[in-house]
Amino acid sequence: MDRTSYKEITTKRSIKYSYYSSSGDASKPTLLFVHGFPSTSYDWRNQVAFFKAKGHSIIAPDMLGYGGTDKPAETALYKHSAMCADVIDILDAENVSKAIVIGHDWGAPLVGHLAVRYRERFLAFAFLAVGYTPSFANFNYETAMATVKQAIGYEPYGYWRFFVEEGTDQVMKDHLESTLGIIHPADPATWKEDLCVPGAAKAALLADKRTPIASYVTPEVKQHLTDMIVKDGLGGALNWYKVILSGLAAEDDKGIPQERLPLPLPVLYIGGKQDCVNPSALALRTSTQLCSDLTVKELDTGHWLQLEAPDEVNETLKEWVETVEKKAKL
């Protein structure tokens, strides 16, 4: 992605964001891409190139804690209500009244919160890997893990406890090759052993376990990931986990009215059949209950589907975006 196409904005709460911006055909909806952990807007490079060629205007921010955007240490700054307001500030700066928003990983819950807090600013919502998550108001980690284990037979989020410990950022830096292999494994099934089991991720890194890295991690991509982890650090980014386990997200979401949770606008979910951490059966439980206009597509990939199968993801998104455009014109 061309660095000359990046802009900077200081949001209303005085946080600097860096974001990719590309202008296209005004008759086509603007596409807003929201990445997750541990990533930057660079994760959307295949989608940006594809949809730019189709004439869409595109916005892809480095989210709070990543890339060229500020990386504050204070966990409270990562509350979803605040980050949603930041995103709206970016849309306002680009004079975008309505957009189609696409989120992956932790970007998906942020998209879910945009749906309940700023629904009027969007035409449709797409969720990759993680389903529609509009509120953490009643979320308790231990209770949730017990419930999920009963549903799917194992705890998918065992690594969360390690990710909120002090010093995790430094452990990831000190064991870079191990970190890259665990985050982007050649075999997605290794996550069931290395991430899902409580304590396994920390033990693997401290033992400097070397896991074969996925083929989409080219030398250029590896350098980008190295710079992100070693030069920029993940201390800020790990706050996306801390805000949940600290209870700050639950407190923040208590004010969301229950009537805002059902989502009547077009929704797309794309899941990876080999994603152990976010299996579609888990991701779709809320989506099928609350999304009345839901399209579902499952691909034979792991968690990083937009990187593993960019052509399939792009075509799926394109077909869905075209249906959204048609509905918007009715």
Image (cartoon, rainbow, N blue to C red):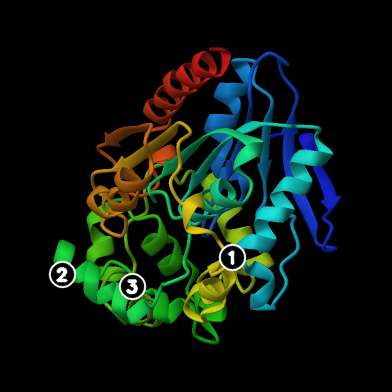
Q: Which residue occupies 42% across, 80% down? A: 162
Q: Earlier in the sequence, mark 1 or mark 3?
A: 3
Q: Residue 175 location in percent, x, y?
A: 47, 74
Q: Nearer the viewer, mark 1 or mark 3?
A: 1
Q: Nearer the viewer, mark 1 or mark 2?
A: 2
> Label 3 neighbourhood size at 10 Å, few (<14), some (14-19), many (20+)?
some
Report the front residue among 310 and 89: 89
**Up-down relation of residue 69 to residue 136 (above or below):** above
Residue type, label 2: Gln
Quadrant for the N terminus in the image: top right
**Up-down relation of residue 110 to residue 245 (above or below):** above
Q: Residue 249 location in percent, x, y?
A: 54, 71
Mark seen at residue 150: 2
Name the residue carrying label 1.
Answer: 229
Name the residue carrying label 3.
Answer: 209
Residue type, label 3: Lys
